[in-house]
Amino acid sequence: MINKVVKNAKEALEGVENGMTFMLGGFGLCGIPENSISELVSLGITDLTCISNNAGVDDFGLGLLLQKRQIKKMISSYVGENDEFERQMLSGELEVDLIPQGTLAERCRATGAGIPAFFTPAGYGTEVAEGKETREFNGKMYVLEHAFDAQFAFVKAWKGDTAGNLIFKGTARNFNPMMAMAGKTTVVEVEELVEVGELDPNQIHTPGIFIQRIFQGKDYEKRIEQRTVTPKS
Amino acid sequence: MALSKQQIAQRIAQELQDKWYVNLGIGIPTLVANYIPQGIDVEFQSENGLLGMGPFPVEGTEDADLINAGKQTVTILKGGSLFDSAMSFAMIRGQHVQLTVLGAMEVAANGDIANWKIPGRMVKGMGGAMDLVASAENIIVAMMHTNKKGESKLLKQCSLPLTGVGCVKKVVTNLAVLEIKEGAFHLLERAPGVSVEEIQNATEGNLIVDGEIPEMKL
């Protein structure tokens, strides 16, 4: 088996530079690559383009990079929980490309699957479709959307083995599998790094072929954005 | 009396049909899950990658790795499943989800909907709403009939940036149930004690009132 293991986040992020385009997995704060984000903050690189469904909250997730003005452009579907983001966007400091969530997911998938573009009905007739080719299929209108180009993808999985095979947990899967496929260099952090043979091949969500570097993550905070519970009766 | 948000959800729940997969948006739509009619089986899809979404977890059992599209902690029912975002939207665009319920800032008599952006003021993003409205066969919009200033949100034409064109077929508000067809709002039911005239006054778009309009049964 090809060993993809690196020691830590520092080693995993070797080669990241100012001005690069990154993909970062997660939905809200669920399934975000916490260790890689911390490392990006301490590296202090700037002018980044970040492709991520959300932009974190003010003091966690991608919000940490926004605070330090490391991000030049965000490509997301929903950015509602972050005041600093909204401030930077409305003042024009931050470039923002908002795209429909399913289009974002499929563009990531297409990137990794060797598909340069595809037609989707999402956004037809709205400002999202402005300047894009549209076409009718079977009486319905569709918009042409393109794959991305990302130097690095940062992914968070629950378990992974040294060959880079991954298993996700709960709804922390979200964008991680498609982004894992899409990065030119895909960096995975896992809660539990195991030897090859310990994961059942039938249960692998993302095969190791897509992964370049994997490391044992640490100190996961796993912050909950909206803690909704029913009281113990 | 105009309906409460809970009552709007309760009325929408009456539209659910046996064996439907249903996507509920954030806000009033989420409440629909509390009023599933007896004797029917429906399954809720959450576009962040969950089918068979259950109620909020009992205090102390919440799991940061199990949330809904509103980022709220939830549970998964027996028979539920988990998947990635691309597969989730394959379910949506591929029309495997029978009903979408979502909120709106504005709806127009031609079926257009706007719910993601107020230029220069509020830009939260569309999330999955554009994929949902472009694909779903059945869309019910849950909304208040008027805004805080008392102005109609059921318009001739949307003034805000659109989320989807010509896609809304049914609207349930605090005042009425309306169907959208042939470029007009058709009044189907009134909230208990609300007159046709009140609904007429609160509706800017063309409103068709055909015959006696019954009160909703809740």
Image (cartoon, grey):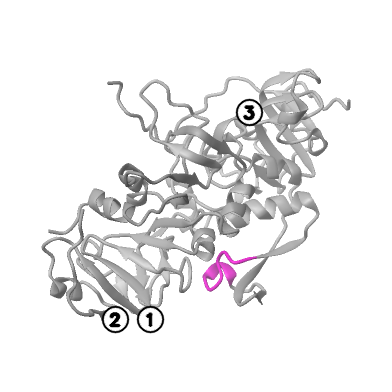
Please, which chain is the residue tagged with disc 1 on?
B
The residue pinned by badge 2 equals B206
Kindly indicate whether the residue at mark 3 contacts the one at mark 1 (C-beta within 8 angstroms). Answer: no
Q: Main secondary structure of the magenta part?
A: loop
Q: Position of residue B127 (x, y in %)?
A: 50, 53
In the displayed structure, does residue A108 sit left or right of residue A56? right
Q: Nearer the viewer, residue A28 or B140?
A: B140
Please, which chain is the residue tagged with disc 3 on?
A
Structural crowding at the residue carrying mark 3, measured as other residues with C-alpha within 10 Å and reported as few (<14), some (14–19) or many (≥20)? many
Kindly indicate whether the residue at mark 2 contacts the one at mark 1 (C-beta within 8 angstroms). Answer: yes
Q: Quadrant of residue A123?
A: bottom right
- What amino acid is found at the position of numbered circle 3 in the picture? Asn
Q: Position of residue A137 (x, y in %)?
A: 66, 74
Which comes before the other along the chain, label 1 or label 2? 1
Q: Quadrant of residue A1?
A: top right
The residue pinned by badge 3 equals A35
Q: Position of residue B196 (x, y in %)?
A: 15, 73
Q: Nearer the viewer, residue A210 or A153?
A: A210
